[in-house]
Image (cartoon, helix red, strand yellow):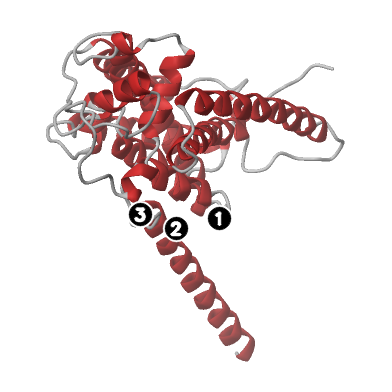
Amino acid sequence: MKLTLRIGSLTDNIITGFLLTLGMAETGHLLMVFGHRPFSDAVICFAAEFVICFAASLVLLFRQNVRGREPGRQEKEGSGRELAGKDITPTLAGIALVFGLIVLFQVITVAFGDAVVLKGDQTIETVQSILETGQVYAVNPLTGQAYTTGVPKRIKILGLPTFYAILCRLAGIAAGDVQRGGGLCYVLLTRWMPVVVLFLTYLAYWTIARVLFPTGKDREKRLLFMAVVAAVFFVGNYMFGMDGYGLLYCGYRGITIRNGILVPYTLGLTLRGKWKRTLLCVAAEACIVWTFYGMGTCVLVTAGMGALCLLLRRKRGALRVVRKEE
């Protein structure tokens, strides 16, 4: 049987896979922090979880493909296949060209540019300390000496450096290759990961575009929306704290992942009524960025959208009652 992918769910599958990968790394991280296990056990735990999840995803993909072939079953949410087999208008081609050029410039800037911002961040040093000591937060990554006052538990929970350290170990990158301004780990953190984050950011915003413009007739509007988003990132890279600045110059940081991927994807999920999946975004933010024990931006977005939906439902219910009385 020939397997085919449902394009409409591919975006969700990719982003969800990334969030689950962060969760797998967090499991190994917590194993080191609270189980006092060596880093090698965290790597084994991550590898085992990855293999299990990958096998499970193949099974689910096969079942989804079989169910999609059932007679009379229609795909939900617009699969995006409406773009195939249709004539490309000059307007669509022009918007696609502008969007492609902006994204290409951003990818070149991220992958080959030298303007990487490391100020105020010690991720690279933390990764190096993990690879050298085999433990997380065993020593101060800036001094190499043991902590004198200890590390707050909320800081210990943040597992993004462990995720990067696991990637380095699986890629065969030794601790000696971890250094600012050079080394394979430096390239991994400041070049490859920001490109991945940039790609996932546009996928997250694509989920919003599909909700705002749901039909195949709106393909030009969808692409225009994405071009506007890319342009905003392009012109918004002038100051630290701006999303465009983070994506182009420090895409490996947890705050960039939150602002670029988690927040827009949470908004896209709530617009589609997929409230349960927002828990993945909330958990991912709690694992990589300082929050009040998970009560971060994704929680605020979910709560705000939930309150708005309840308000709209009540207004609709009130209108129906008035119409019946009339």
Residue 16 horizontal side relative to residue 225, left or right:
right
Residue lying at 46% horizontally and 37% vertically, measured from the top left: 36
| Circle 2 SS class | helix
Q: Which residue is mark 1?
A: 275
Q: CA distance from mark 1 to mark 3?
A: 16 Å
Question: Residue 317, how many percent across, how many down?
Answer: 57, 78
**Residue 267 seen:** yes
Earlier in the chain: of badge 1 and badge 3, it is: 1
- Closer to the observer: label 1 or label 3? 3
The answer to whether residue 315 is above or below residue 205 is below
The answer to whether residue 117 is above or below residue 315 is above
Q: Amino acid at mark 2?
A: Thr
Q: Which residue is mark 2?
A: 302
Residue 43 horizontal side relative to residue 251, left or right:
right
| Circle 1 SS class | loop
Residue 265's image quarter?
top left
Q: Which residue is mark 3?
A: 296
Which residue of the protein is positioned furthest toward the bottom in this rendering? 325
Q: Amino acid at mark 3?
A: Gly
Residue 121 horizontal side relative to residue 312, left or right:
left
Number of callouts: 3
Q: Do tag 2 and tag 1 residues touch (Cβ < 8 Å)?
A: yes
Residue lying at 56% horizontally and 86% vertically, measured from the top left: 322
Question: Residue 234, how many percent across, how many down?
Answer: 22, 28
Disc 2: CA contacts within 10 A as few (<14), some (14-19) or many (>=20): many
Residue 253 horizontal side relative to residue 294, left or right:
left
Where is the C terminus found, in terms of image quarters?
bottom right
